Image (cartoon, rainbow, N blue to C red):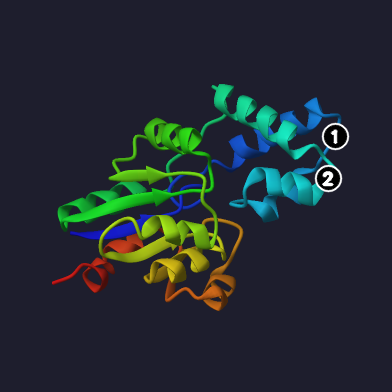
Amino acid sequence: MFTIGFDLDLTLIDSRQRILTAAQRAFADLGYTVDDALLLPHMGVPIDDVAREVVPGIDADRFLQRYRWHYDTDETTPVPVLPGAEELLAAIRAAGGASVVVSAKQQAAADRAVADAGLDVTAVVGGHFGERKGEALRRFGNVRAYLGDHVEDASAARAAGCAFIGVTTGEFDDAALLRAGAVRTVGNLTQVIDLLPEFAPA
């Protein structure tokens, strides 16, 4: 059995609009107005850290509470599965592998997002970012690669002792992901299917 790790937001699912909607509503609850353009470059970073960055002095704990409420009760903003995600997960299963999602989302939110998207994965671990994602990945056996759209996902792969495959469906392009340490980049998850023999043990 081998394991392939995945980031969630903007790697397997496009939750960008729901994140932005929940964040805007949470900022408004606390009396702030923040333009989406200020938030987009921080996609994939824990949202309370983003709030501290864009609104110095904000009550980040209260913001996070309001954000989670708005995100969890939003029944109208779609969160589509990104092209190729289901096909790649099926290919990993067919090759005898496991798919593990490690996300910065809190555990309950990550579980819900995966369930809502109907993604067939082996395990979901929430509440980890950057290098700590790699620490979580090490709980699983024979981790061969971690796929993510954020430059900090390279830190996760290094901490897990596996290859980092950069996915350009987020805010970082090929050059940025390669500089961060990606062994290669893809624009669509179906492109990873042909790479599986490199990562699946013979």
Q: Which image quadrant: the N terminus?
A: bottom left
Residue 33 x/y as whole percent: 84, 36
Residue positioned most to the left: 202
Residue 101, placed above or below residue 27: below
Location of residue 70 with respect to 161 vertically, above or below = above
124 with respect to 202 (left or right): right
Res. 168 visible in picture: no
What residue is pinned by disc 2? 55
The type of residue carrying mark 1 is Tyr
Q: Quadrant of the C terminus?
A: bottom left
Residue at 38 percent across and 58 percent down: it is 137
SS label for mark 2: loop
Q: Nearer the viewer, residue 62 or 110?
A: 62
Tell whether label 1 touches label 2 (CB within 8 Å): yes
The crowd level at tag 1 (other Cα within 10 Å; few <14, some 14-19, many 20+) is few
Sooner in the amino-acid sequence: mark 2 or mark 1:
1
Relative to 55, is 158 on the left or the right? left
Q: Position of residue 117 (x, y in %)?
A: 40, 35
| Left or right, residue 52 beside residue 196 | right
Gap in angstroms between the C-alphas marked 2 and 1: 8 Å
Write the residue at 44% across / 61% down: 134
The amino acid type, in three-letter code, at marker 2 is Val
> Regarding mark 1 in the picture, which secondary structure is present there?
loop
Q: Which mark is residue 32?
A: 1
